[in-house]
């Protein structure tokens, strides 16, 4: 057996072992591939930089339903993910945040639609009347007319950046004063300034125009949207900015 043949057989064995790893074990294996930290943990470097977890991979501690005191049962911890498994409600962090950098991964079902809300409040009859939303979407399968990563209803994102249903997409969301950036799979897909003339014009022309708190909260909750489809989130981390 020559060296190349041996290496090929080793690669096949390793691939087979990875495919055979079930459930959470497979997820942890995927998270630690290439030297990355295990899922839902922080590296020493992240801790030193001020990052902390919003989801520990084991419990829903730190989360509740929007306008609720507890978590809706439709959201559950499944194989190290925070997953919408049946009809539920939007969920939010128990803590409010002002300026921050948020990092997470999401994986949505075919035809799926969801979102990540920021600076949300509970003074209207739906979370989206106060909170801007970063779109979570199956671009191909859902007839929404937008692309994943968009600031819903106001700022579009380019097509083709998202990975399809069943694949993990990485998000970086920066909210610092009036400045907002949406990053999807290491690509900056949206950038805007809250309260700018451009933003004001877009809000005025949108369905949010009559809602006084939309995009104007100085601080608020981070939320995950329940929108009829299975969706899972993991590696939810935040770094508070000055």
Image (cartoon, rainbow, N blue to C red):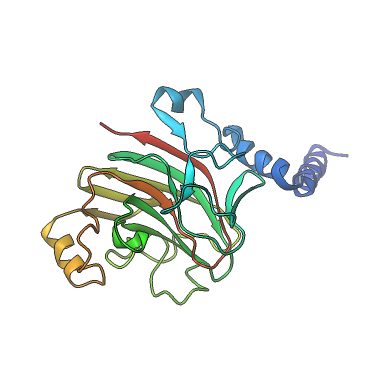
The percent coordinates of residue 208 (x first, y second) are 25, 67
For residue 105, say whether it is visible: yes
The quadrant the N terminus occupies is top right
Which residue is drawn at the image coordinates 30% and 62% (left, top)?
129
The quadrant the C terminus occupies is top left
Which residue is drawn at the image coordinates 28% and 39% (left, top)?
99
Residue lying farthest front? 69
User: On the rendered structure, is 127 left or right of 42?
Assistant: left
- Quadrant of the rendered image containing residue 60: top right
Residue lying farthest bottom? 143
Front residue of this view, candidates 168 and 76: 76
Residue lying farthest left? 197
User: On the rendered structure, is 4 left or right of 212?
Assistant: right
Front residue of this view, candidates 209 and 176: 209
Which residue is drawn at the image coordinates 27% and 44% (left, top)?
219
The percent coordinates of residue 130 (x first, y second) are 29, 58
Residue lying farthest right? 1
For residue 150, say whether it is visible: no
């Amino acid at each position: 057996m020559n060296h190349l043949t041996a290496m090929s057989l080793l690669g096949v064995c390793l691939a087979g072992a990875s495919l055979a790893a079930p459930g959470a074990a497979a997820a942890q294996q995927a998270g630690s591939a290439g030297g990355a930290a295990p899922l839902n943990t922080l590296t020493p470097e992240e801790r030193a930089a001020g990052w902390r977890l919003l989801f520990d991979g084991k419990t829903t501690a730190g989360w509740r339903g929007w306008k609720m005191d507890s978590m809706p049962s439709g959201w559950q911890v499944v194989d190290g993910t925070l997953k919408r498994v049946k009809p539920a409600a939007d969920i939010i962090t128990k803590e409010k945040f002002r300026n921050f950098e948020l990092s997470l991964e999401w994986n949505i079902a075919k035809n799926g639609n969801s979102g990540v809300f920021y600076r949300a409040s509970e003074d209207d009859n739906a979370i989206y009347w106060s909170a801007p939303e970063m779109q979570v979407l199956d671009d191909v399968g859902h007839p929404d007319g937008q692309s994943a990563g968009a600031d819903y209803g106001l700022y579009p994102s380019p097509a083709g950046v998202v990975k399809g249903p069943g694949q993990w997409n990485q998000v970086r969301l920066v909210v610092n004063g009036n400045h907002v950036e949406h990053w999807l799979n290491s690509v900056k897909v949206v950038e805007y300034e809250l309260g700018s003339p451009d933003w004001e014009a877009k809000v005025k022309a949108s369905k949010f125009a009559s809602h006084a708190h939309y995009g104007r909260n100085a601080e608020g909750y981070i939320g995950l949207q329940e929108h009829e489809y299975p969706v899972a989130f993991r590696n939810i981390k935040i770094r508070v900015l000055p």
